[in-house]
Amino acid sequence: MNAPASPRRVIVAITGATGAIYGVRLAQVLRAAPGVETHLLVSPAGMMNVQHELGLGKADTEALGDVVHNVRDIGATIASGSFRAEAMVVAPCSMRTLAAVANGLSDNLITRAADVILKERRRLVLMVRETPLNLAHLRNMTAVTEMGGIVFPPVPGFYQKPATIAELVDHTVGRVLDLIDVPQTLAPSWAGLNGQV
């Protein structure tokens, strides 16, 4: 008799930068993806942005995760490398969270889980949100990249001719899903201009 396949575990963290819509939309899509178990963390500042930018309350936000962790719970499952999470996405990623990850400061469950993902050589995607960037931001992005993480600023693409903000967000979220190997239909592969130049 074959044992049932284990779910693919993906950690999604929402931190206190503008762009809460990226984390919420990513969690929505992952929640609906077959065979994916989503572990959700929302920092206090992240929750403030979710409420301000999207009008969502705590209960509605937490309903997006299969498992919800308190950011202060350093003893949670995802704080250990023995917990087989395949990937982690911080969407959006504040400069404070970026700095903590870049410098190995596991001072809450978000930064600890990111540290675990890096040390276990798994996929970490940080959707950093700030502009303009100062030298500390750039150095921290370099450090995370050198450690194997992916710095993915949610810069909108216009070549797909989006008509709505939702289309812009979906395109970016689709690109992130590609990076963590979750099948998606939000951002179809570029088919080329087909001689339309």
Image (cartoon, rainbow, N blue to C red):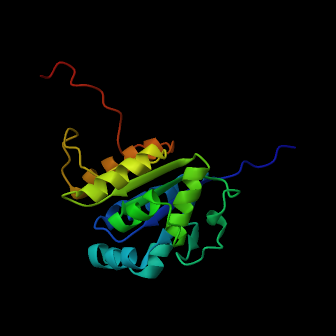
Tell me the quadrant of the picture where the C terminus can be found: top left
User: Is residue 60 at all visible to an observer of this figure?
Assistant: yes
Question: Residue at horizontal 40%, vertical 55%?
Answer: 126
- In this view of the protein, which residue sits in the foreground, 75 or 30? 75
- In this view of the protein, which residue sits in the foreground, 53 or 125? 125
Going by the image, does 128 lie left or right of 149?
left
Query: Picture coordinates of residue 127 (x, y %)?
Result: 36, 55
Q: Quadrant of residue 187?
A: top left
- In this view of the protein, which residue sits in the foreground, 143 or 157? 143
Q: In this view, does 151 lie above or below 97?
A: above
User: How many labels were placed on the picture?
Assistant: 0
Q: Is residue 148 above or below residue 131?
A: above
Residue lying farthest to the top in this orientation: 195
Query: Picture coordinates of residue 190 (x, y %)?
Result: 31, 31
Q: In which quarter of the image is residue 25?
A: bottom left
Query: Picture coordinates of residue 139 (x, y %)?
Result: 33, 52
Q: Is residue 1 above or below residue 70?
A: above
Residue lying farthest to the left in this orientation: 197
- In this view of the protein, which residue sits in the foreground, 22 or 77? 77
Going by the image, does 153 lie left or right of 72?
left
Question: Residue at horizontal 52%, vertical 73%?
Answer: 108
Query: Picture coordinates of residue 5 (x, y %)?
Result: 72, 48
Tell me the quadrant of the picture where the N terminus can be found: top right
User: Is residue 86 at all visible to an observer of this figure?
Assistant: no
Question: Residue at horizontal 32%, vertical 75%?
Answer: 49
Q: Quadrant of residue 73?
A: bottom right
